[in-house]
Image: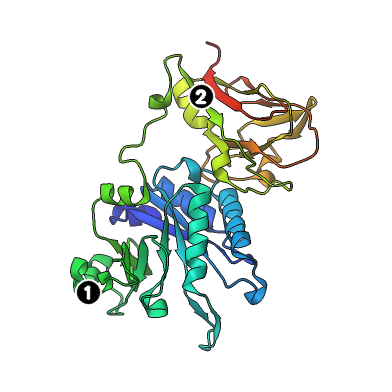
Amino acid sequence: MDLVAARRDGIDFFSHKGTEGTRFIHEQCGEALNRARAAGIPFLGAYMVPRTPGNGGNGTIPEQVAYFLSNVTRMVPWWPLHPGWFWQMDTEHWYSSSGVAYDAVSPAVGAQAAQMLAQQTGRKVLHYAPKWSYGDNVPGSEPLWASVYPAADAVHYRERYAEVHGDSGIGWASYSGRAPAIWQYSSAVTIGSQPRCDGNAFRGTLNDFAAMIGAPKDPPSAAQRLDEENEMKGMLPVGFAYDENGYLLDPRLTVQVAFEDVNAVLGNVVASFSSDHIGRELHVRFATGSNGGGPVVYQNGKMVIGPGQQRTYQDVTDGHTWAGIGRRKTSATPAPITITLPGGGTLDVPEAEWPIAWSLERYPK
């Protein structure tokens, strides 16, 4: 889909499938959301398709949420820094191409997964759980994402919305104790240059949408985050961000930094992490752009992630360089890590317990 054309055509929010159960990853998720962000679409999200635990070999609800978060963060490492980010839970009954039901997912499964996802990330979850599947039996308090298709011919999305009576259309009728926040009113409209798209409407302004998902109306710029000493600083939260295999458990327990944004404000920078306690290792995750730049990691004086190897670790196709650092569960005692940053400076990560302070400052002063 041409997302630049979609943005020019008035699209303000966009979500993409991330995972289904614990057995399917939509690998195009990262590439699509990178393009959506580059196109300037302000509100972006990824959606999870929950499956009945045990059906088709899918795991428990906590395992499905962990699978979703780990893979979306691998594909879209910048999501915790995007102020207009939201999640979508896509709960429905699933049928084969011959019309045979193979998983009648309970709405309670989707509601429980949505609650867990919100608790683990601090971001709003919108629950797609249509009335045609569940009637008035969708539990929880998450904003509902409804779907009702009063007509099927392929026309422009604005034309179709007007044809189905817009903000007074039947898709806005309350069910399960609340009015839908979003109405998917077609699966065959044209958006920008793309035919046969899902058409979704929100009744309100951009600030109303921001309020619904808990996003700031006017997010602060990098310059506004600087303190009086021309530094960015903060504390790494207590808890394990990664499991023993390095898979993300909770992105709220990481600090993620876009180094190109820092350089734009500070010039050449030096980043440091420090702690008063000695303990288990920090886990360092990098994503580097296709420009071949980005941090280089050394351990015991030996390069362990070089420029030619970084893309196999994490790859971001929009040219941004990100670092996300958080605590990992392990019984090993690692050596200190030193990182060289593009533009100069070093980042020293000691063997650290809590608390861990981080700062970014101009180098040299």
Q: Residues within 10 Å of mark 2 (few under 14, many from 20)?
A: some
Relative vertical location of residue 249 with respect to residue 188 in this rendering, above or below: above
Which element is circle 2 on? strand
Determine the residue positioned at 23% across, 55% down. 204
User: Left of 270 or right of it: where is 349?
Assistant: right
Residue 1 coordinates in the image, percent (x, y): 43, 61
Residue on which disc 2 sits: 233
If you read the primary sequence from the N terminus, does the residue marked by circle 2 or circle 1 appear first? 1
Residue on which disc 1 sits: 164
- Of residues 47 and 188, which is closer to you in this image? 47
Q: Count the marks.
A: 2
Q: Amino acid at mark 1?
A: Val
Say which quarter of the image contains residue 172: bottom left
Alpha carbon separation for disc pair 2 and 1: 51 Å
- Residues at badges 2 and 1 in contact (C-beta under 8 Å)? no
Q: Residues within 10 Å of mark 1 (few under 14, many from 20)?
A: some
Determine the residue positioned at 58% across, 73% down. 52
Residue 147 coordinates in the image, percent (x, y): 35, 72
Relative vertical location of residue 187 with respect to residue 262 in this rendering, above or below: below
Residue 240 coordinates in the image, percent (x, y): 65, 41
**Residue at the top extreme, as displayed:** 365
Is there any visible trace of residue 130 in the rendered image? Answer: yes
Is there any visible trace of residue 5 in the rendered image? Answer: no
Residue 229 coordinates in the image, percent (x, y): 46, 14
Which element is circle 1 on? loop
Coloring scheme used: rainbow
Q: Amino acid at mark 2?
A: Lys
Relative vertical location of residue 196 with respect to residue 69 in this rendering, above or below: below
